[in-house]
Amino acid sequence: MKLVIHDLSKTYANGVIALKDVSLTLSNGMFGLLGPNGAGKSSLMRTIATLQEADSGTIFLDDVNVLKNKTRVRQLLGYLPQEFGVYPRISAERMLDHIAQLKGVAHGGERRDLVLGLLEKVNLYRDRKKHLGTYSGGMKQRFGIAQALIGDPRLIIVDEPTAGLDPAERNRFYNLLSRLGENTIVILSTHIVEDVSTLCSCFAILCSGEVLYAGDPETAVRELDGKIYFKAIDHGDMPHYRDAYRVISTQLRSGKLHIRILAEDMPPGNGFSVSPPSLEDVYFSNITSRVDINTI
């Protein structure tokens, strides 16, 4: 199974360029789409999910033209949007049954087996009779995945799925998404670097509607070996260091500003120490040319 996106562009009526010549190729497994808020991630997800038109470019899911054969795409797609609402006074079991009917599962016995099997898969079987309004944030997200899996989709899109989850719920969600990615293309759109480093075998960095980097996390991190340095400085000295070095991230700890810089040609000296790179360094080194580090 392959999803091939080629030269996809989208500009909204207010002049905002949401996507600019986006080209990506995705195969079975977890694919991370990483970028700051407003990078164009949701615009790309909505276009793939046939919820908005593109101005130009193509998307093919194997031989299916996504932009022209929307009905077929929706039969193959599972989608968990960033804002997933639920009916608070309906049980998870009844709601999934209703969604399965809407997706064409007409036979009552088949539908019941499907619903109970999905609730078991997302670890909600024991809570199937509870009203959705009583669910925690993580339980609602797992219910969202259950509804996205109806119809045995070949492509699953999840947009910012771990935002607001506590660590335990987040870990359970990681495990669920990893299992789904074994036989399906799963696109994980997020601004949380840890989500990508934990789950994804391939990823892309999107910023200002453009793909800045695409590859696998291990290779991306390895490319920065020996190039990342750190130092603790006084906050007031930041303008000097910003002018003298390529500062990619900052963190205030114990009254000192800890800065990380990218030095590609030679060691910077001046009290800097080399640091093992991380995927966060890959992310920041790509987006700092587009986004002020003080805003991320």
Image (cartoon, rainbow, N blue to C red):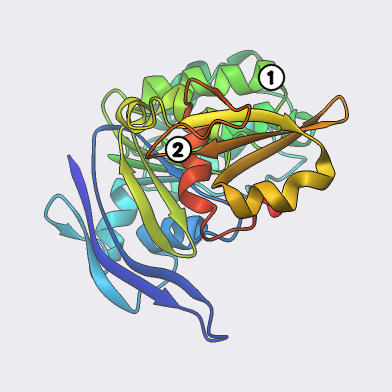
Across and down, in percent, residue 89 comes to 77, 40
Q: Residue furthest front?
A: 270
Badge 2 local density, few (<14 within 10 Å), some, or many (20+)?
many
The residue that disc 1 covers is 167
Residue at 35% across / 48% down in the picture? 213
Alpha-carbon span between mark 1 and mark 2: 24 Å
The reply, left or right, for residue 199 in relation to residue 130 is: left
Tell me the amino acid under the disc marked 1: Pro
| Whether residue 177 can be seen here | no
Q: Nearer the viewer, residue 128 or 9?
A: 9
Secondary structure category for the residue under label 1: helix
Left or right of 109, for residue 15: right
Residue picked out by circle 2: 282
Mark 1 vs mark 2: in front: 2
- Give the percent coordinates (x, y) of residue 66: 25, 62
Tell whether 82 sits left or right of 88.
left
